[in-house]
Image: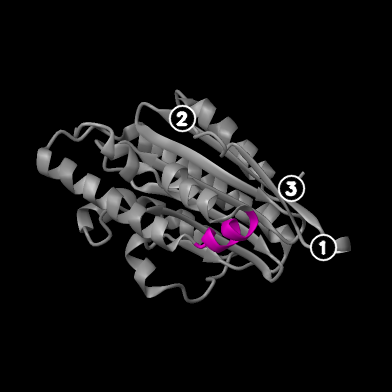
Amino acid sequence: MTLYQPFLDYAIAYLRSRLELSPYPIPDGFEYKSAITGKGKNQEEVITTSYAFQSPKIRQIRAAHVQGGQSLQVLNFVIFPHLNYDLPFFGADLVTLPGGHLIALDMQPLFRDDLVYQAKYTEPILPIFHAHQQHLTWGGDFPEEARPFFSPAFLWTRPQETAVVETHVFAAFKDYLKAYLDFVDKAESVINAPALTAIEQAQLRYLRYRSEKDPARGMFRRFYGEEWTEEYIHGFLFDLERKRQYSSPI
């Protein structure tokens, strides 16, 4: 079993226990993709599998799981609410590379500087953040341009030991996911037209940033080529803009 498979298995089972899940369409060619990298004894098969669901309040729950041997393990797990809810995004980037582990967990806010929004969605999870920060120290600088898209409860860490990922990171992942689904339980549909517009613009702003700056782009291009990579990013991982082109406004 790979390092992040237990995270994925837990998340799907827990989501099923809390939400009314149905499949979210995955475009052809994205559920499973493999490539051979390296030469001779260093040859490895890199497999990328994709999973996607939806529920009455959630537009897309999706996971990309990359397995490329001990030195390449990635799980990108994101939850995007429907556009008539002001819920933040749930984001988990769990990355293992030859140089170590890179872990990012957050409930990424639609409105970073709105104090009422912060009181609703950030302050309740700060105790969870501080509890896990004792074991998962701050991972250091990250791009200035990314800061508006993360909350004060952004758990960003670079553990050296795999055992820390298997224990403390997994515990944080579970707590953040539970807290997020507690928010989903309480979320009420927004009907105010200006608020709906603001939510849509905030979601699009985030997705455009993520799709343009996706740190996995170089890795995917190397393994699967540019055409597959760009279609995977825009047609599945961050597909809202394309979906909006083919649907009427709320």
Q: Residue 95 is drawn in which quadrant?
A: bottom right
Camera-side residue: 217 or 39?
39
Q: Is residue 122 visible?
A: no
Give the magenta range.
215-223
Q: Which residue is pictured at 29% across the width and 50% down the height?
A: 204
Residue topped by disc 1: 39
- CA distance for labels 1 and 2: 37 Å
Q: Judge depth for marks 3 and 2 and give the one in front.
A: 2
Q: Which residue is pictured at 77% across the width and 44% down the height?
A: 1
Q: Position of residue 71 (x, y in %)?
A: 74, 62
Q: Residue 168 is drawn in which quadrant?
A: bottom right
Crowdedness of circle 2 by 10 Å Cα count: few (<14), some, many (20+)? some
Q: Tag 1's secondary structure? A: loop
Residue topped by disc 3: 2
Q: Are marks 3 and 2 in contact (CB under 8 Å)?
A: no
Dot 3 or dot 2, earlier in sequence: 3
Q: Which residue is pictured at 57% across the width and 34% down the height?
A: 12
Residue 33 in magenta stretch: no
In the rendered structure, which amino acid carries the disc numbered 2?
A: Tyr
- CA distance for labels 3 and 2: 25 Å
Dot 3 or dot 1, earlier in sequence: 3
Q: Which residue is pictured at 70% across the width and 59% down the height?
A: 72
Q: Which mark is residue 239?
A: none
Q: Position of residue 231 (x, y in %)?
A: 47, 47
Residue topped by disc 2: 24
